[in-house]
Amino acid sequence: MAAEKWVLMVTAQTPTNIAVIKYWGKRDETLILPVNDSISVTLDPDHLCTTTTVAVSPSFDQDRMWLNGKEISLGGGRYQNCLKEIRSRACDVEDTEKGIKIEKKDWQKLHLHIASFNNFPTAAGLASSAAGFACLVFSLAKLMNLKENQSQLSAIARQGSGSACRSLFGGFVKWILGKEGNGSDSLAVQLVDEEHWNDLVIIIAVVSSRQKETSSTTGMRESVETSLLLQHRAKEVVPKRIVQMEEAIQNHDFSSFAQLTCADSNQFHAVCLDTSPPIFYMNDTSHRIISYVERWNRSVGSPQVCSFFAALSGRCYEFCDLKHIFVLSILSASARENSYISFP
């Protein structure tokens, strides 16, 4: 490694995602291993994405991170797990134009600066942590010249935020729960790319600005500990729905897609009510939206719209077939490199 005070940077962009077959409940909270498979759709990064620039330099004396211009701590276990996993897989890097050469062993003593920016509100129920950790892992992998593919990287991103593993791909993505105790086979795979169903659009309706009373982490833990319905769902219901949803996506079968998405959302909220103490993520406006969607579909004789509600503070998602209505956005591209953003 050269002695001069150089800086090497990489910038990446990753979109957020929303689950149509939901992830709810962990069998291992440290490794973030789910109790069931899940399937998500990746959103258009022009609407919802994280952009992250990572930099390394021998002049940096500690790892530091800024989120939306404000410095945050990297001391949390999830950040440290991701950094440890990435550094352990780092390879030699050489930039002949700048005269920079970093050997594999150097990465253990070099420090990083990380600047991350969301083009949508952070902590607003729009899966900012999923996009954020996916972007962090992807950009660091590029900086440190990792040889792992996207699915292998997703197993690292998962340790920051479970849903982050699905944000490394565009289109429809499946998070496989895996069987290994160390989580090595709990990773994401792309089912179809963003061009497969590009006349599908998504509405995000904000039905409340209040922060949710029960965090997802706490809610999942309490559901795993107290809900018999969750155990039935994970073992008996989700495996069949995963197969049916994959078929619906492959065949552009919106009727089946809508039925499965609505049913899974409803069962997720039933699990929340079956949890002790019960968890409430929907309000009167949420229920009215469900009623309107049902009435609309009945009036035309077939599903044109489907609605579902995540474990969020007042966020309703609706899917529509573009042949009938145009609303917001198409499916997005996967994680990608980009021009850099500046550090504060």
Image (cartoon, rainbow, N blue to C red):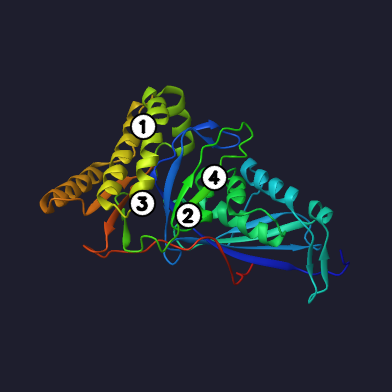
Residue 282 screen position, x and y as percent = 30, 41
The label on residue 249 is 3
- How many residues crowd mark 4 within 10 Å: few (<14), some (14–19), many (20+)? many
- How many residues crowd mark 2 within 10 Å: few (<14), some (14–19), many (20+)? some
First in sequence, mark 4 or 2: give its number.
Answer: 2
Secondary element under disc 3, as helix, strand or loop, is helix
On the image, numbered disc 4 is attached to which residue?
161
Secondary element under disc 1, as helix, strand or loop, is helix
At label 2, which amino acid type do we have? Answer: Thr
On the image, numbered disc 1 is attached to which residue?
237
The label on residue 227 is none
The reply to whether residue 113 is in sight is: yes
User: What's the residue at 44%, 42% (across, down)?
Assistant: 38
Residue 307 screen position, x and y as percent = 27, 48
Q: How many marks?
A: 4
In space, the residues marked 1 and 4 are separated at their CA atoms by 24 Å
